[in-house]
Image (tube, rainbow, N blue to C red):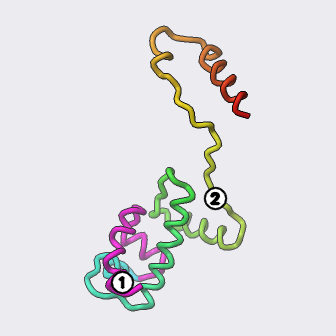
Amino acid sequence: MTPEQFRHDLPARMRALGISAIALGKLTGLSRTQSFEVANGNRTPHANNIEIVDRFLAKCEELAQKVHPIPIDWNRVETIRDIFTSIRMGYLEIKIVDRAPHQEIDLGALAGEPKKIEEIVAPLSHTLAGQQ
């Protein structure tokens, strides 16, 4: 990645993740000044800083994709560091698996008179049993 491409792509990557320059600096070990220079594109950052930030953001993007749609609070620096360390050491695997059958439920049929939970669940459980 060229420095110009990095400067162009970085703001969008940070926005997509919801990560601030301050959190980026704390998590990558860059000084506050360096992290703001990198994030704001005021000047071309040192090639080493580009590599550090690019590699780190790739890890963040991978983690964010694994836990989507759950948002990550990147400001919880110690927790984020612990998560990345645990993943790197092989102690932690994070994934969200949606195993629910995707069927539409007629919410209009549920409106009106209150129903017993059994009246709502029974048709669903029959449908689910038929899919197995």
Q: Within the image, what quadrant is residue 32 found in? A: bottom left
Under circle 1, the secondary element is: helix
Residue 128, placed above or below residue 72 = above
Residue 121, placed above or below residue 101 = above
**Residue 129 placement, left or right of 32:** right
Q: Are marks 2 and 1 in contact (CB under 8 Å)?
A: no
The disc at residue 34 is 1
Quadrant (top left/top right/bottom left/bottom right) for the N terminus:
bottom left
Q: Looking at this view, name the residue that lies furthest to the left.
A: 42
Q: Residues within 10 Å of mark 2 (few under 14, many from 20)?
A: few
Q: Residue at x 74, y 34 (%)?
A: 132
**Mark nearer the N terminus (2 vs 1):** 1
Q: Residues within 10 Å of mark 1 (few under 14, many from 20)?
A: some
Q: Nearer the viewer, residue 112 or 85?
A: 112
**Residue 52 placement, left or right of 5:** right
Under circle 2, the secondary element is: loop
**Three-letter code for the amino acid on which mark 1 is drawn:** Gln
Query: Magenta includes 22?
Result: yes
Q: Residue at x 70, y 73 (%)?
A: 89
* Of the two numbered discs 2 and 1 in the rendering, the one whose residue sits closer to the viewer: 2
**Residue 110 placement, left or right of 121:** left
Q: Which residues are magenta?
A: 1-30
Q: Which residue is mark 2?
A: 94
Query: Magenta includes 60?
Result: no
Q: Position of residue 86 (x, y in %)?
A: 66, 68
- The secondary structure that dominates the magenta segment is helix
**Three-letter code for the amino acid on which mark 2 is drawn:** Ile
The disc at residue 55 is none
Q: Position of residue 19 (x, y in %)?
A: 40, 65
Q: Residue at x 72, y 28 (%)?
A: 129
Q: Residue at x 32, y 80 (%)?
A: 7
**Residue 85 placement, left or right of 15:** right
